[in-house]
Amino acid sequence: MTKRAFILGLLGGTLIAGFGYLNDSVFRLNYIVGNHVPISVFGLLIVFALGVNPLLRRFGRGVAFLPSEIAVVVALTLVGCTIPGSGLMRDFTQIMVMPAHENRVRPEWQENRMLDYAPPQMLVNKGIYDEHVTGSYLYGADHAEGRRLLDFGNIPWQAWATPLAVWVPMIFLSGVAVICMSLIVHGQWSRNELLPYPIATFAHAIIAGGKEHGRPPLLRSKGFLIGMGLIFALRLFNGLYLYYPDYFVSIPMRFDLRPFADLCEPIKRAPGWHALLLPTIYPAVIGFAFFLSSEISLSIGLAQVIVVPILAILASFGVSVAVWQLDVGLLTWQMFGSHLAMALMILYMGRHAYWRILRQGVTFRGPHTDGHRYAVLAFRVFILAFAALVIVLVWLGLAWPLAVLMVTLMLMMYLTTARISAECGLPHVETNWNAMAVFLGMFGIAALGPRAIVITGLLCAMFMVTVRESLMPFIVNGLKICEDAGVRPSRIGHSMGLVLATGLAVAIPVVLAVVHTTGSSMDWWAGAVARLPFERGLEAVYRLRATGELDTSLGLSALQRLSHISPQPGFLLATGIGAVLVLLFSFLRLRFAWWPLHPVIFLVWCTWPVVGFGHSFLLAWIIKTALMRFGGSALCDKARPAMIGIIAGDLLAGLLFMVVGAVYYIVTGTPGRMFFIFLG
């Protein structure tokens, strides 16, 4: 890893982390990140590796970047991508400051003193509304005329100092734990299980194109050029149509089959039915899915086809089938059970490797090969970060068993989402469960109590509700990109931690300066996430008061709560069904080579990404199956450059309209048209 690669990667990650919020929430342009295939990173990678870097070779040896250097820059930049949007900053400030505003306008919160259940150090100004603090956050500084976009003097640091001192260490510790987990599983996933890593595979294909002098090999491939040209032209026409609908036509990428639902009215009772009958084609997703085994692309493609009729039948019998990130119910618990079983399968399949790491990490004995040493060191740091997180949660008022379980579930979610990214190539991953929902189902309201509900709800709002830009998928793909380019994981892990720390140090002041100068973006989703802990706590207060258990629940000690555990009806059944289905399909897949479905289906069905991307995965399966049938693996290998070109064309078009939107904003002062190549 060279100095210039490290510096560029650090700058790239810091710039995205620090100023991505301006792009998304102030200028309201196309998302600078948005998912785990950020156009701002991979689009620029294509331009640099296939366009700029070959030109740099003309200036002599040592000027152009080596593939290993480009890989390091990409991997470090990806770390910063978890900070500016849904990974953190979209919700970060609202979770700390909005409860004071909501309490002011909601009499039921005031009547039940809901903010008293939250540790005051977790909220800005201890949860007390102050016009200078909360008012300037919502509406901006009073001196609106001639104000600067970034005025750090408007930040009421005294009100923010305490909650930042609580949250920022937890965020950094969780990031350190994630980086360590990624280093621990990397060798097993990459070299032993040979996971496909579609996102990293695409990046390596682009980076490897710079090994030879002259034109990169990809630019000499007709399949790549045709695939890239066709998709870029298609997206270009559709993008121009957004700006000039009177002069251009739109090439349809979505087909409305919803009228057919009238033939079967009960299907409309199932969530996701409309998207099932509104197929949308995402070319880049088809390209990524082409790198997968057929069982995975078929499973994701059929997920909604299978689950929507099941949910319609359940709904016809009066069973609640509501499912999204903020819900608590049967489908939430089923998804949790499936993720739990997948985590167990991950540990089982890598048991020998993980046991060696655990044994050497604890006993300080064992082989000292370089490929093993970094994982052992990562394990030791992981244990320290885990313990520190638990200590902080106990200090905040959470009973230590709940604190341990909270951190475990949080890291388990990151592990399974990273596995989905590495094994399935989903650009956008959601889970539809969180620790608070699990605790409510597992322990019951009386045993948990309103205070624990609010604390775990705040933690879930910050760390678990939105994982579409979570850190671990960025890390595992970054490690794989580096490994394929010849960079050892041991050389990149500590640099990722430095990028995370630097990104946070820049992003937090920038975001606070923006919101206290121009006012909050009032993002409806972030507002709903900020209300979630207190709304769930209020429901618990009402139910406990109705049964006369409120005072008893509030007075229980940690040990007494164990005797009051009463799982909610359906929790054990739904969790068990989710776990059994994953374990059963895992066994069938490992035992029988002909088994056609992958257990990931039970982790992703009903989630927004699969609702949107499912048809593209199914189309990729059809294309690959047809190629295998009529030309075998040789024909599939010939099609790979075309699929890489399809992804490249889609990302380049997305990058082009990011630039167009920014220029349009600079010229007109108003946001340009939102142009999505993935889900919005």
Image: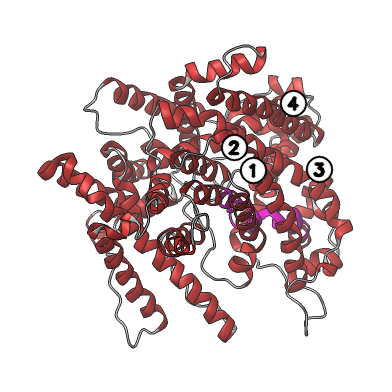
Name the residue tied to disc 4. Answer: 400
Above or below: residue 525 compared with residue 665: above
Q: Is residue 87 magenta?
A: yes
Q: Secondary structure at mark 1?
A: helix
Q: Is residue 112 left or right of residue 443?
A: right
| Labelled pair 2, 1 in contact (Cβ < 8 Å) | yes
Amino acid at dot 4: Trp
Q: Position of residue 224 (x, y in %)?
A: 28, 58
Name the residue tied to disc 2. Answer: 491
Residue nearest the observer in this picture, 315 or 634: 634
Name the residue tied to disc 1. Answer: 495
Q: Is residue 210 magenta?
A: no
| Labelled pair 2, 3 in contact (Cβ < 8 Å) | no
Q: Position of residue 539 (x, y in %)?
A: 66, 45
- What range of the chain is rendered magenta? 76-100
**Residue 435 seen in this snapshot:** no
Residue 497 occupies quadrant? top right
